[in-house]
Image (cartoon, rainbow, N blue to C red):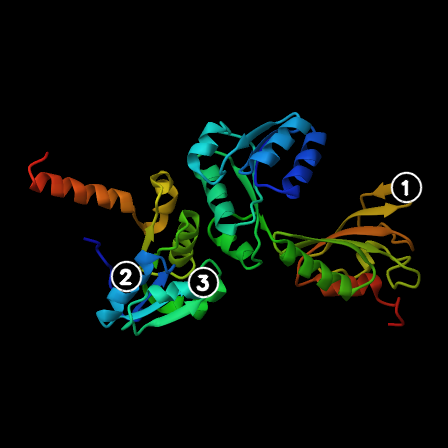
Amino acid sequence: MLNFKSKDKKELFMIAGGSRLGANIASFLSKNNKDVVIIDINKNAFKKLHPDYSGYSIAGDAVDIGALEEAGIERAYVLIASTDDDNTNIMISQIARILFDVPNVIARLYSTEMEEIASENDVKVIYPYKLSIETIEKILKERGCL
Amino acid sequence: MKIVIVGNGTKVNFLADSLIKKGHQLVVINNNLDECEKLSETKNIMVINGEGSKKFILEDANVYGFDLMIAVKSNDPDNLVICLLAKKILGIKRAFATVSNPRNVEVFKKLGINTAVSATYELSNIIEQMAFADQIVHYMPLDEEKLQLLEVAIEKGSMACGKQIMDLGLPLDSIIGCIVRGNNTIVPNGRTEIHEGDKLMIFTNNVSHEATLHVLTGGVKGE
């Protein structure tokens, strides 16, 4: 699916935003023995993590480069911008690509109208509603409704 | 100039008044309905109620090709997106933003928005410079400290008094652009003499700043 580029030294998976998506992907990566760190401005977000989650959790503002540095963004191999705010996700993902040269950056956006800006500098943008439509289409086709 | 301002609160009100007075054509995009009503009642400008960091709102506002975008929302990511949309989609060449986090001045610059200002950032610079020398009347950092515009008052006893500019020993990357003497402004050359009471407008950089001040103010405080 996503074609990840490899880079030896960087091995951290950074999740910016402890939304349901963020917390679940962090739990999933941790279960797969990846080095994971999740950042959220609100500590309560970490309650959504799986009880077996063994990565780091950092309470901080992920659009503050100080917080990103503290979380180890220099070592990040993958960054997933999964806060609940599109503009915040755009800013985090551009910071990750341009300022810290994170090789694989994924941003989750709700609105599709920012594509031109959000996908700049090789940021992979995903849209939950598009993915839902694809899945529904598949189900409908399987059931012969389409 | 055709200017679009995105933001709310007293900042927008003040900015709008000041820009209207200077004869600019203004569009304000504000996401607070009450504020919008008040703005459109009191000022002769176009006011749009909506979230200015959304592309469709900016498109509806029809601000294509405007001369200047000013993003003064309190949220830094919103201001970044507004400026990026202005430059890439709306063809607005100049975009100006305020940022809450002082570190974002540098971040915005790296992301292509080189005119972000942070009140905290500017204030800390100004305080630093004010503390440095009493003789500095005004201090204005340009291009983030790399270039500075100083207004220096020449006090009694300064070693610069009575000297011609070429004999001052000013650092090479400092230049006196203008001298205010009483009611006159003088564009100086190397032979212009510095008098007590002169106000000098000086362009310098952060490297030569200190040496420049030393040449002009040395001797005043028993140096």
Q: Secondary structure at mark 3?
A: loop
Front residue of this view, candidates A42 and B77: A42
Cα gap from disc 3 to disc 1, whole angstroms = 59 Å
Report the chain holding disc 3: A
Residues at marks 2 and 3, CA–CA distance in whole angstroms:
18 Å
Residue B219, horizontal then vertical, whole percent: 88, 68
The residue where tag 1 is placed is B183
**B34 lies left or right of A97:** right
**Residue wearing tag 2:** A25
Pinpoint residue A56: horizontal percent, then vertical percent.
36, 72
Proximity of marks 3 and 1: CB atoms separated by less than 8 Å? no
Judged left or right of residue B58, residue B38 is right
- Residue at 24 percent across and 65 percent down: it is A28
Name the mark on residue B93: none
Looking at the image, is B161 positioned above or below residue B79?
below
Q: Amino acid at mark 3?
A: Asn
The image quadrant where one finds the N terminus of chain B is top right
Is any atom of residue B145 visible in this view? no
Is residue B101 toward the left or the right of residue A69 in the image? right
Where residue A65 sits in the image (x, y, percent)?
47, 62
What is the total number of numbered labels drawn onto the structure image? 3
Say which chain tag 1 marks: B
| Residue in the picture at 45% in, 70% down | A70
Q: Residue at x 27, y 66 (%)?
A: A27
Q: Residue at x 37, y 46 (%)?
A: A118
Q: Residue under circle 3?
A: A42
Q: Earlier in the sequence, mark 2 or mark 3?
A: 2
Is B223 in front, or is A23? A23
Helix, strand or loop for disc 1? loop
Whether callout 2 and callout 1 share a subunit is answered: no
Where residue B11 appears, as percent x and y from the top left, is 65, 43
Is residue A62 at least partly visible in the picture?
A: yes
